[in-house]
Image (tube, helix red, strand yellow):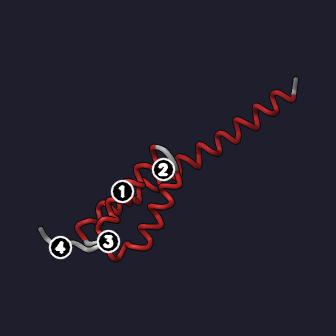
């Protein structure tokens, strides 16, 4: 078994956190982005694909959650204004 870099496990963690940011919560995506920024140059070339996929899924997850939060704010504001009209 070839010896890998000690930070190669971060590549899998970044990918998993990126997927979790889409599925359950955006803070996982933020943690994935921080991990990527701190260890990008220390991860071996074989694992860079995982890092890129984790980065992309993190961005997508954060954007989805930001859109959802904005949507819920507008819905709540509309509901409050509709109730106050009666």
The one nearer the camera, 18 or 7, is 7
Horizontal side of residue 33 vs 80, given as left or right: left
- Give the residue at x 28% y 73%: 6
Q: Earlier in the sequence, mark 3 or mark 1?
A: 3
Labels 3 & 1 near each other (Cβ < 8 A): no
Q: Position of residue 4 (x, y in %)?
A: 21, 72
Mark 2 or 1 closer to N-term?
A: 1
What number is the disc on residue 3?
4
> If you read the primary sequence from the N terminus, does the residue marked by circle 2 or circle 4 appear first?
4
Q: Contact, CB < 8 Å: mark 4 with mark 3? A: no
Image spot of residue 74 (x, y percent):
71, 39
CA–CA distance between discs 2 and 1?
Answer: 12 Å
Q: Secondary structure at mark 3?
A: loop
Residue marked by disc 2: 61
Percent across and percent down for residue 25 are 51, 48
For discs 2 and 3, the disc positioned in front in the rendered view: 3
Horizontally, residue 16 falls left or right of residue 1, namely right
- The residue under label 3 is 7
Q: Quadrant of the C terminus?
A: top right
Q: CA distance from mark 2 to mark 4?
A: 33 Å
Callout 2 environment at 10 Å: few (<14), some (14 to 19), or many (20+)? Answer: many
Tell me what residue is drawn at x 38 percent, y 60 percent.
14
| Screen quadrant of the N terminus | bottom left
Q: Is residue 38 above or below residue 82?
A: below
- Callouts 2 and 1 close, C-beta under 8 Å: no
Name the mark nearer the viewer: 2 or 4: 4
Q: Disc number at residue 15?
A: 1
């Amino acid at each position: 078994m070839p010896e890998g870099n000690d930070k190669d496990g971060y590549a899998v963690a970044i990918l998993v956190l990126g997927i979790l940011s889409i599925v359950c919560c955006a803070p996982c995506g933020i943690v994935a982005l921080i991990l990527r920024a701190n260890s990008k140059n220390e991860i071996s070339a074989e694992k860079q694909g995982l890092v890129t996929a984790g980065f992309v899924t993190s961005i997508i997850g954060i954007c989805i959650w930001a859109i959802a939060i904005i949507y819920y704010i507008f819905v709540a504001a509309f509901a409050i204004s509709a109730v106050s009209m009666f």
